[in-house]
Image (spheres, rainbow, N blue to C red):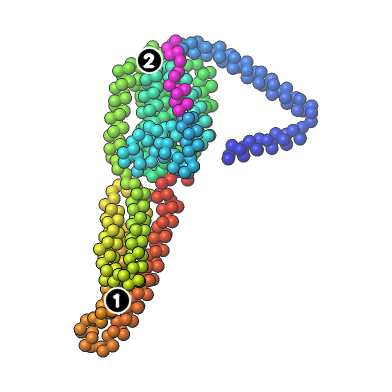
Amino acid sequence: MRVILFIIFLAIVAGLGYRMTTAEDRARYLQIALNECRQAREAAGRSRAICEPYREALRARTTWAIVTPILAAANVIVFVLAARASGGGELDALLAWGANLGPRTTNGEWWRLVTAMFVHTGVIQLVINVTALVQIGLILERLVGRLTFTATYIATGVLAALASVSAQPVTVSFGASGAIFGLLGLMVAALWWSFRSESPLRIPTLAIARLAPAIALFVLFNLVNDDVPFSAEWRAFAIGLVAGVVLTRTITEEEPARQHVLIAIGCTALATVLLAVPLRRIADVKPEMERVIAAENRTVAAYNAANEQFRKGKMTAAALSVLIEGTIVPELQTADTRLQTLQRVPAEHQPLVDSAQEYLRLRIASWHFRAEGLRQATMLSRGVAPSTERDANANWRVSTEKRHRANLRTLGQAEGSERASLEALQKTIAATTVAVRLPGR
């Protein structure tokens, strides 16, 4: 939307400029623009000539960059497919295509740490990330080698996703920015080592200047965009930088040694496991909330069916009371026990769990009252009353019936308030999608 508004703004400015200038002014401005374009083209030609020895040295080391186009294509393909399959909603589409979410990732779906790197939610985010990836990758892949390049991309992307789960467990995170920041750190280290020699692989200043706009735009965009927490992206940059300092010390002479890269991969894998272990089994409250609602629906349906039989005289009040105490209340108590045994509930989810527990407490109390009322009704219908009350008051039946009617009115009020609490709980769950958030929402 912002891009469209910007284009409209440019069109308005261009139209006003056209109206406010004469034909001679427009011809002069056009000539100035053509001269500037000609000078820019000549400068670009000089830049290519200066950078050509560097490009030749890169081609001599690695003829073609293969991994970079594959990664860029994978990001674009996943975006297109996810966009076409988003009929169930943006959140559902992102999760279906592998976005990162703490309760899902840490409960057996660890593969999301990898797949989240290829999921994007907007064209602007995709274009900026892919542009930065291609600009960095076409140089870096040929400079450090495919193994080092690929390992850095995946390792820093996974660690950034893991940091995102730790910092924001109930926020859906996605995007290649963490992995690209890791590559950027690796590139900074490689360039620093290359500047210490006069090798043909020392990158020219003009080549750095051509990379700068895309990298600056990438960094600025991620400063204001939180698809992956910026702290996680900076950690990925730091990891890539450290890896580069260690692995690219002799980068102007040769690619990083394969055994050194494999050792670094092993150390990174071990660190990933050690960081992931404390994050295991973040509670996913969505299934538990769904069980609470399902239990409510089942118990109400069972009671309504039995109550219909009671009204037709096919079921006694005593039997209805037994159904409540023997079937309905235990099912709700089971749901309450499951909520009480939840561990590692994210702070954002805890109020929802507390409200569900409060609802169950009130609902169970309501069913107990109803069962007691049915038992009292059975005693009245049989003409049975406590002997002390019968002896003390000949009108015990009338007073008992009055108390029973008052009790039923109270139960009706309690039932209404508890139903209202359930409706409020359902609205809360629907409005917050069980506290699962998309970034920036």
Label 2: which secondary element: loop
Residue type beneath disc 2: Glu
Is 291 left or right of 198, judged from the image as shown? left
Q: Earlier in the sequence, mark 1 or mark 2?
A: 2
Please check the rendered image and state whether residue 218 is part of the magenta-colored stretch, yes or no. Answer: no
| Residue hosting label 1 | 377
Q: Position of residue 356 (x, y in %)?
A: 35, 57
Which residue has dot 2 on it?
255
Quarter of the figure with residue 366: bottom left
Which amino acid, by three-letter code, is at mark 1? Ala
- Percent x, y of residue 61: 42, 12
The residue shown at (42%, 55%) is: 428
Number of residues whose C-alpha sits closer than 10 Å to that of mark 2, classed few (under 14), some (14–19) or many (20 or more): many
Residue 330 visible within the image? yes
**Residue visible at 73% across and 22% down?**
31
Q: Is residue 34 left or right of residue 210?
A: right
Is residue 4 placed above or below 303 in the rendered structure? above
Displayed quadrant of residue 313: bottom left
